[in-house]
Image (cartoon, grey):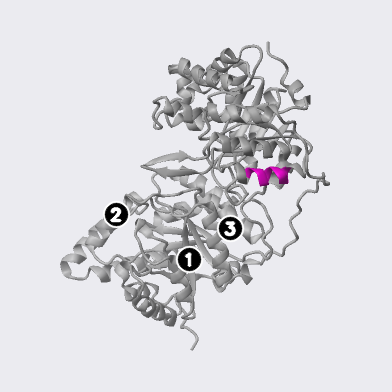
């Protein structure tokens, strides 16, 4: 059996990891649409060949070919039930290549799914997923574990827990950072190192994402706050697009120069990540052989970051809309679409009609049905200049985590206070199906982000100073085909801090009543969505092409009959009025949509439910 890896931790020399497995497999003809982890079962000789090339280059520690070998990843290839076997075989292949003199590190990467509070996966579920991979790696004979390329501290914490629950083997825990020196969750390297130290990692470090220059600054910051050994496995620089391919441009010589600097900054374990090859590792190994790790920065006391005390703004003080919800008063709103172009004249004319009628707020959709329109935040800013509050719909479709946080901070600075947080329709539904969608998180994760901002914390848990003061709600569909799943998601949204909910347009009052009975225990204000149908054609379109909308046959028949008399629009308003009158005492407000932009039809629905606007 190979030496105890813990003995290597006590030695005062630099140990060398291997380089990229995926880069090498791709170079050997394995296309990127294949599952690289499955090669442990289908082509073990190819994986073993890569391991041996890295050993010849001077690597002392081989990582198993298991970066994506957790159940959530493997299920995308129909391999979820083979998770344990794939990990076991990967470890056996690396063990066979390493022999008795070299070490094998069981590689585990992120799950590729969002954890609570930014997604539906619980911490316990995440630990179980990691545990399944850990069991296979242990059976295959690994000497240690390397947890790598993590951005979410809570996710890597679950990976550490899984290893500690099943094994006492050493753990190398590595975060990944962006070119701003922080993780995508906004965690700086020093803060990350403190937490990894606290959770019991034996080696703490960074890998992937950026080249060695950015990693060097981050490693120096880590070295100041932990006495644990440090590791660094940078990419071969930032990838560039060349003739349709992602190419890593940092030469082996350049990587070797930075390897020396990283070692001088305190790195004990050095290697390469994406884009690195045996030649990169060969020159890194030469640099490591000539140097011993030493600390160039004086140690400082480890002090946990403590968020400053903030005063969370009460709901009734955030906006007039929020104040009415907090007091249990009935709120009214009309939904109008932003313009398709840059001229808001027509939209603002409708805004003034709605304001003068005494409606509380205007709902502004954010690219509904994946259409390109003026941004909801810009349109809402124009609307609020007319003296009426806007409820800004904000979708997860078009922006990554950092972009969403930036938008929300900007909205707070502009004075926008009311939000409706939605996941968003996929681009394939709209006129630009080739557009890409982001969906870093869904509406549940977005609720958690906004709640943190309201408590003075960014998405990484870092203080932002003055907290935001958003009144934020969510969408809900009483007519969902899978109602149990809709109710489950609704409960998660409540747990994430949602302060009200607006339903999809509902045309069946009995269905809405049954839904209200199921969610009453949550105590969340429910605003009913009401849509006055403009024509039978409009009713058919809504019923067949708008996701989440169900129109009963009786309503379709009424609209069809009215179409023949030339009174379809009036019938649509009558149906909406009946709906509102029947549920008025059961809900906390109503959102009326303006069909085809016809403001008078929307205002006609209220019929006695509005107080005249103050002069």
Secondary structure category for the residue under label 3: helix
**What's the distance in space between the residues labelled 1 and 3, CA to CA?**
13 Å
Residue at the (51%, 65%) spot, across then down: 588
Question: Residue 216 appears at what percent x and percent y?
Answer: 66, 43
- Farthest bottom residue in view: 615
The region drawn magenta spans 215-222
Question: Residue 181 appears at what percent x and percent y?
Answer: 62, 49
Mark 2 vs 1: CB contact within 8 A: no
Q: Is residue 28 visible?
A: yes
Residue on which disc 2 sits: 543
- Considering the whole magenta stretch, tell me its main secondary structure: helix
Residue on which disc 3 sits: 450
Question: Residue 449 appears at what percent x and percent y?
Answer: 58, 54
Residue 218 painted magenta: yes
Mark 2 vs mark 3: in front: 3
Say which quadrant the N terminus sits in: top right
Dot 2 alpha-carbon crowd within 10 angstroms: few under 14, some 14 to 19, many 20 or more? some
**What's the distance in space between the residues labelled 2 and 3, CA to CA?**
33 Å
Towards the viewer: 318 or 607: 318
Towards the viewer: 518 or 225: 225
């Amino acid at each position: 059996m190979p030496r105890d890896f813990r003995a290597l931790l006590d030695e005062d020399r630099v140990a060398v990891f291997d380089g990229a497995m995926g880069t090498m497999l791709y170079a050997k003809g394995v296309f990127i649409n294949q599952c690289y982890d499955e090669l442990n079962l289908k082509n073990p000789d190819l994986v073993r060949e890569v391991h041996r090339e890295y050993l010849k280059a001077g690597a002392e520690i081989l990582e198993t070919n298991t970066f994506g070998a957790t159940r959530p990843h493997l299920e995308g290839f129909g391999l979820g039930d083979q998770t344990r076997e794939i990990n076991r075989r990967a470890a056996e292949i690396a063990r066979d290549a390493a022999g008795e003199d070299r070490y094998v590190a069981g590689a585990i990467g992120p799950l590729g799914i969002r954890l609570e509070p930014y997604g539906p996966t619980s911490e316990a579920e995440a630990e179980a997923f990691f545990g399944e991979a850990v069991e296979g790696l242990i059976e295959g004979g690994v000497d240690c574990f390397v947890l790598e390329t993590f951005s979410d501290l809570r996710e890597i914490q679950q990976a550490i827990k899984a290893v500690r629950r099943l094994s006492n083997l050493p753990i190398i825990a590595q975060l990944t950072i962006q070119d701003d020196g922080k993780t995508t969750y906004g965690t700086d390297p020093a803060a990350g190192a403190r937490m990894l130290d606290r959770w019991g990692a034996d080696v703490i470090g960074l890998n992937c994402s950026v080249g060695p220059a950015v990693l060097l600054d981050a490693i120096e910051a880590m070295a100041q706050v932990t006495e644990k050994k440090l590791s660094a496995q940078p990419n071969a620089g930032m990838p560039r697009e060349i003739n349709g391919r992602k190419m890593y441009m940092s030469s082996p010589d350049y990587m070797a120069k930075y390897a020396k600097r990283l070692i001088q900054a305190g790195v004990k374990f050095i290697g390469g990540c994406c884009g690195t090859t045996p030649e990169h590792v060969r020159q890194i190994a030469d640099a490591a052989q000539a140097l011993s790790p030493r600390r160039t920065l004086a140690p400082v006391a480890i002090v946990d970051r403590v968020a400053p005390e903030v005063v969370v703004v009460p709901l009734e003080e955030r906006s007039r809309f929020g104040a009415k919800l907090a007091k249990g008063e009935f709120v009214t709103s009309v939904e109008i679409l932003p313009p398709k172009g840059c001229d808001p004249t027509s939209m603002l004319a409708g805004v003034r009609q709605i304001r003068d009628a005494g409606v509380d707020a205007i709902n502004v959709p954010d690219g509904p049905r994946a259409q390109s329109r003026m941004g909801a935040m810009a349109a809402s800013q124009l609307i609020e200049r007319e003296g009426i509050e806007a409820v800004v719909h904000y979708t997860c479709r078009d922006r990554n985590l950092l972009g969403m946080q930036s938008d929300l901070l900007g909205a707070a600075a502009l004075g926008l206070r009311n939000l409706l947080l939605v996941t968003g329709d996929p681009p394939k539904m709209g006129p630009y199906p080739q557009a890409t969608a982001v969906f870093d998180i869904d509406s549940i994760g977005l609720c958690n982000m906004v709640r943190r901002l309201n408590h003075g914390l960014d998405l990484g848990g870092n203080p932002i100073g003055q907290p935001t003061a958003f009144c934020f709600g969510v969408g809900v569909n009483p007519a969902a085909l899978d109602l149990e799943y809709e109710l489950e998601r609704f409960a998660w949204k409540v747990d994430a801090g949602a302060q009200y909910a607006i339903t999809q347009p509902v045309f069946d009052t009995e269905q809405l009543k049954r839904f209200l009975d199921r969610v009453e225990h949550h105590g969340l204000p429910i605003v009913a969505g009401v849509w006055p149908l403009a024509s039978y054609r409009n009713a058919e379109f809504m019923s067949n092409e708008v996701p989440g909308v169900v129109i009963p046959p009786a309503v379709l028949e009424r609209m069809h009959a009215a179409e023949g008399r030339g009174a379809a629009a009036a019938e649509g308003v009558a149906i909406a009025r009946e709906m509102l009158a029947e549920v008025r005492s059961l809900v906390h407000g109503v959102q009326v949509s303006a069909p085809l932009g016809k403001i008078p039809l929307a205002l006609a629905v209220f019929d006695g439910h509005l107080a005249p606007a103050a002069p």
